[in-house]
Image (cartoon, rainbow, N blue to C red):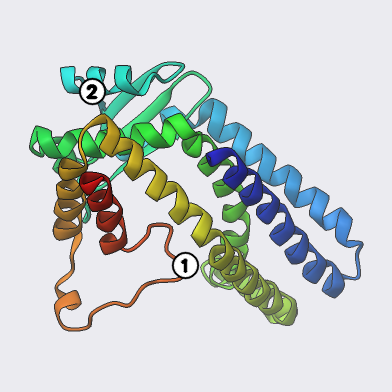
Amino acid sequence: MSRPRHFVLILLIFAILALWAAGIALVLGAAWHQVFALFTAVGLTLFALHYFFGKKWLITRLNARPAKHSLLTELVDKANIMGKVSFYVTRSFETANAFAVTYSDEHAIFLTPEVWQADMRLLGPIVAHELAHVKNGDSLIAGFTSAFEQILSRFSKIWLAFLMGGPLGWIILLFFWPLLLFVQLWSHITLFIYRLLASPLMQGREFEADRMAAGWTSPEFTSQALKAIDSYNSHWLKNIFPLRENPLSTHPPLRERIQQLEQMTTS
């Protein structure tokens, strides 16, 4: 089920990058395909650097250390994943989290201390969810799409970059501010369009990962794990200003995920 979704997501990335390149080329008076080819090459280079050399950098940045437990080994065996799977505990963040990344030599799953120290009945479904992303190839595609998204994201902040660049940056802004302003605004617009269109695809893979995690553990424990994570990450403002569903979110609303798990339980 994930392969068609991945294919559409990759096509979307290239379509959005072509749209962005067309706008930039129009202002610069250049051929759009030249701009498209240049930044496609940059995106592929970023992905290659991430895939082959990014693990050490991320481990250092997150101050991560290897983690081992019999439960982790058991879940990896259940998932029947090809290749090496390693687990790491990161430094603490404001939110409890877990995520999977695929590199050339291994699949790495990173867990915050809050997740790692959770009850085994909750830790199991969380880890199983990330293993499902690995199994489905989501952890590889995420690195690919992230490389291209980083291009648009960096250009959407280009104005700030020159402001922080000191006197030389201010001089460049003084002479080229109309062009830089357009680049920033156009990058914001195309990045918004991408996230709006990509959100349903990314939410679909979360539903699939929940379903697989529930099969390897149980729907009840998976539901409890989702509630525990949401409770830990809840902000006090939620009680005053309830947040509506975010159309740009990569994750579905919690109630919809739990409804899917409850349907699995009743069936």
Q: Measure the C-alpha gap from mark 1 to mark 2.
A: 32 Å
Which residue reaches farthest front? 267
Q: Which quadrant is home to the C terminus? A: top left
Q: Residue 30 at x, y = what percent? A: 91, 65
First in residue order: circle 1 vs circle 2: 2
Of 44 and 256, the residue lying toward us: 256
Displayed quadrant of residue 217: top left
Q: Mark 2 points at which residue?
A: 72
SS label for mark 1: loop
Q: Residue 245 at x, y = what percent? A: 36, 73
Left or right position of 109 against 205? left
Displayed quadrant of residue 213: top left
| Residue shown at the point (87%, 56%) measured from the top left | 33
Q: Is residue 134 visible?
A: yes
| Residue shown at the point (53%, 71%) measured from the top left | 160
**Within-10-Å neighbours for mark 2: few <14, some 14–19, many 20+:** some
Q: Residue 248 shows which numbered tag?
A: 1
Left or right position of 73 against 207? left
**Within-10-Å neighbours for mark 1: few <14, some 14–19, many 20+:** some
Displayed quadrant of residue 88: top left
SS label for mark 2: helix
Q: Residue 132 shows which numbered tag?
A: none
Q: Residue 117 at x, y = what percent? A: 10, 37
Mark 2: amino acid? Leu
**Image vertical order of residue 52 relative to residue 185, above or below:** above
Of 260 and 116, the residue lying toward us: 260
| Residue shown at the point (62%, 55%) measured from the top left | 151
Q: Residue 202 at x, y = what percent? A: 48, 53
Mark 1: amino acid? Leu
**Image vertical order of residue 14 relative to residue 104, above or below:** below
**Image vertical order of residue 199 relative to residue 261, above or below:** below
Total label count?
2
